[in-house]
Amino acid sequence: MLALFLILVALTSYFLVRLRQQRSMFKNLPGPPHHAIWGHFLIMREIASTLPPDATPQLFAHLMRERYGLGDFFYLDLWPLAPPQLVIAHPELATQIVHKMNLPKESAVMQKWTGPILGDKSMVSANGHDWFIARKSFTPGFQPRKLLEHIPMIVDEALAFAGVLREHSARNDIFRMEDLGAKMIFNISAWVILGMKCNAQRGDDEFLELFRKQAALAPQDFWSRYLYDVSPRRYYRKWSNGRALDRYVGRLVDQRVESGPTAISSEKAIYYAIDDAIVTSRSLNKTIQPATSIDKYTRDMLIASVKTLIFAGHDTSASTLCYSYAALSKYPQVLHTVREEHNAVFGTDPSAAANFLRNDPNLVNNLPYTLAVIKEALRLWPPTGVSLRRGQPDQTLFADGKEWPTYPFAVLVNNCATMRREDLFKDAERFYPERHLITDPTDPYFVPRDAWRPFEKGPRMCLGQTLALMQLKIALVMTVRTFDFEIVYEEGTFMYQVLDVTAKPSLGLPTRVKLVE
Ligand code: HEM
């Protein structure tokens, strides 16, 4: 009994000393009002209460800056529920973190968010050698020149998507646009990455189902992203679904290694991203392997990367498509200008666009206004609006003429907050694609350098940016002149971004489509 009492006293004393240490760390650091016991916990709770419970926390920093008149960066004391944080909301400071210092990803925390789906070695959360090998191996498959070769297939998938929309227009029903968009993008991703034809748009696809099941087990609100999952049942399900997904992707990787173009060496063979990755990883690997096998490290890297690429790609792009449709349905003048651009590039018959694109894939680069619409959607509703880095003892942030510590903080580069700053984006809350076309720096709507950053910048920027923009432009070309989009939230509900690994439209964006008269 005495022993138990002593342990309790020791634990309480340790907690109190730690609490004092943590709270005192924030004494001379900029931030919202700080409480000696609660730190910033109550403020965080108050900000969270202004949004629906499932809203993405990536907007918190923006709301906090507005409410407390905070500057370009500030510190947040959320111990013991979340790591102490340095929040960045300015392009120049973000550049210091992700480019000049290139701080490592905060892997331990990120893996709680993405680990169950993507594994510990995912390119998104890995650092050092593991990241370098994965990134270098998959870079060739995402070169713009290479991606242009996939345009005929992207066009086919976009046409199939338009076919599904046509059926909905005939039924005049309300459906979840996010689900349909994700299925189309999933098919495109599986093709570009693995050369694999999936049927997610027209049937149940086992591969997609495995991803979705696993994603449903990821943390769904702010605090549970940092806290440990205490449910053994969920642990078990994550483990067993995860194994099923790994086995499935492992089989695909093995097939590609054993009988793909890298094994048969024919001049006519088409290389997909996985094949380029096999070749590159072989050239990076010091030990010589036979042409039809790979070592365990490379196999694990390929499995983790395939999962990462497919997941990172299909979720984010599908949400962006939804946000673009939501904006087009709300702003008729923007919709009119997009349609005019498509008429000018592909002629006035919408059904002719597919062949134009198949015959001349470069036309996809001739759509500046469509691109501006997507960019504006990404500015206001970025699917991944933050980059979480780990501060280092020897790295300081230079701001307001002084050096500020990055250690021992988790550094949250909050692009979501940056892209809603009124001093960087005039009329920041307004959906105004024209701002992305302005080249005169004296124009009040000119977008300052590095301020638009939904794909992040620096060495860890999104690997799939070109593919994402390409498939989104094609999906819009194949649909916006054929359909009118109506976003139909019931009384009391509205569109906001929910946290579902990435930031997705609430209720999957309930939509009704009608054929254009
Ligand atoms: C509109 C769609 C997309 C958006 C907004 C987006 C955004 C981002 C952002 C912000 C990051 C950095 C995350 C961080 O720092 O933690 C990132 C990383 C990444 N994205 Fe995307 N992404 C999109 C589509 C894609 C696609 C289509 C692919 C591939 C098929 C992809 C693959 C990746 C990968 C592999 C990384 C990790 C890169 C690294 O750490 O080296 N993304 N993405």
Image (cartoon, grey):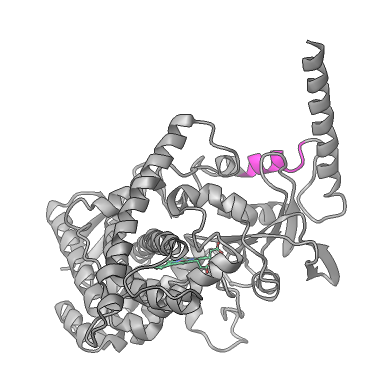
Residue occupying the point 44% across, 60% down? 300
The number of numbered discs placed on residues in the rendered structure image is 0
Closer to the camera in the image, 382 or 481: 382
Residue that extends furthest to the top in the rendered view of this protein: 1
The answer to if 43 sits in the magenta stretch is yes
Could you say where residue 356 lies in the image, as x and y percent from the top left?
A: 20, 86
Mainly helix, strand or loop, the magenta region?
helix
Residue 359 against residue 392 in the figure, above or below:
below
179 or 138, nearer to the observer: 138
Does residue 468 appear to the left or right of 196 in the view shown?
right
- Magenta range is 38-47
Q: Position of residue 71 (x, y in %)?
A: 74, 62
Q: Is residue 260 visible?
A: yes
Q: Report whether 26 appears left or right of 368.
A: right
Q: Residue at x 73, y 43 (%)?
A: 40
Q: Is residue 233 above or below residue 115?
A: above
Q: Nearer the viewer, residue 494 or 101?
A: 101
